[in-house]
Amino acid sequence: MKSSKTIKHEIINILIIIPTTIVVALGLWMFVYKANFAPSGVDGLATVLQYLTKVNAGIFTFALNLPLLIAAWFMLKKRYVIYTLIYTVVLSITLLVCEKINMYQYTDNDVLAAIFGGVCQGLTAILLKIGGSSGGADVIGCMIQKKLPHKNVESIIAYVSYIIIVIGFIVYGNIHSALLSIIEVFVCEKISEMILRDRRNAVKFEIVVDKSQTNILKDMIIFDLRHGATILKAEGAFSNEEKDILICLVSYRQIGEFLRLIKKIDGAFVYYSDVMGVHGNFDYRLDEEKEEDIRKRIELDERSNIEGKTE
């Protein structure tokens, strides 16, 4: 039996899916269809079929996704399938309504149409974030990965998108349509990345230091940068000397400050890279007297290092 909290969470997710899907459908109707190019995913295939048959793409979207979702029901999580089914139904209905009321379609500039079509379709990443998908290539990729875990879902989805671009080029019969498809796919992917990337972006520093320098660097990280750190034991491959690796996440604006601190550590080796997102906090609590004692210790350690270098 589902708890009231779980039911509330499911309802909120569904209330997120519905307006998101409507915006995606409006993007397809207003920007994509009149520009004559195939967007990414199953929507691209439905767009091509609409162009060939003059039958609303919403019908093809539902017809293409339904058998995939039936198969996915037995292989993937039920929540994933239900969320994707809701997306498919709402998208199809919205596209049919747009046709019925003769909704406005933008025709002034094909490139702008591809860009804004990609922006709208990129919003499908919201579904991925809450555990659903936009169907089609996403469902195929997840089912393949279920059977073949070593396969990369993103690569499978990318290959499907490339195939649809080629199909669009053949159907529309010109390079202009293919270039518009590439623009749309590129914008769609960038918007998806922005949505899926956690707002708390960070940089991960990994610093290799001699064990004698570990406490100095650790104290600098905690009391100068106000960050925590994780210490791993290591051994130099060439020297066979014992080393420590300090792992620390900092914000972008602290990169320069962190590098200046590391320069104070003799023999430190550092490398750093982007982090998609951060969850959790470093809880900094220390009384002023204890902090002052530690700062004095840091100053003494730094002074000892300087004197050691000058001897």
Image (cartoon, helix red, strand yellow):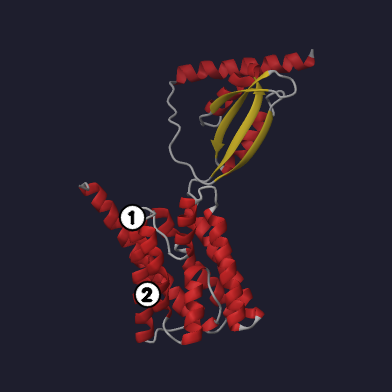
Q: Depth check: give the residue in front, 47 or 72.
A: 72
Which quarter of the picture shows residue 274?
Answer: top right
Which quarter of the picture shows residue 256?
Answer: top right
Q: Earlier in the sequence, mark 2 or mark 1?
A: 1
Residue 239 % position (x, y): 74, 20
Q: Depth check: give the residue in front, 45 or 292.
A: 45
Find the residue positioned furthest to the top. 311
* Amino acid type for the residue under numbered disc 2: Ser
103 relative position to 218: left or right: left
- In the depicted structure, whether residue 258 falls above or below residue 191: above
Q: Secondary structure at mark 1?
A: helix
The residue at 33%/60% (across/down) is: 82
Residue 109 % position (x, y): 57, 81
Residue 119 % position (x, y): 50, 67
- In the depicted structure, whether residue 275 falls above or below residue 39: above
The residue at 54%/81% (across/down) is: 35
Residue 298 visible in rendering: yes
Q: Depth check: give the residue in front, 248 or 301.
A: 248
Q: Check residue 79 in the rendering and tell me which mark sits there, or answer none.
A: 1
Q: Check residue 92 in the rendering and tell me which mark sits there, or answer none.
A: 2
Residue 183 visible in rendering: no
* Amino acid type for the residue under numbered disc 1: Arg
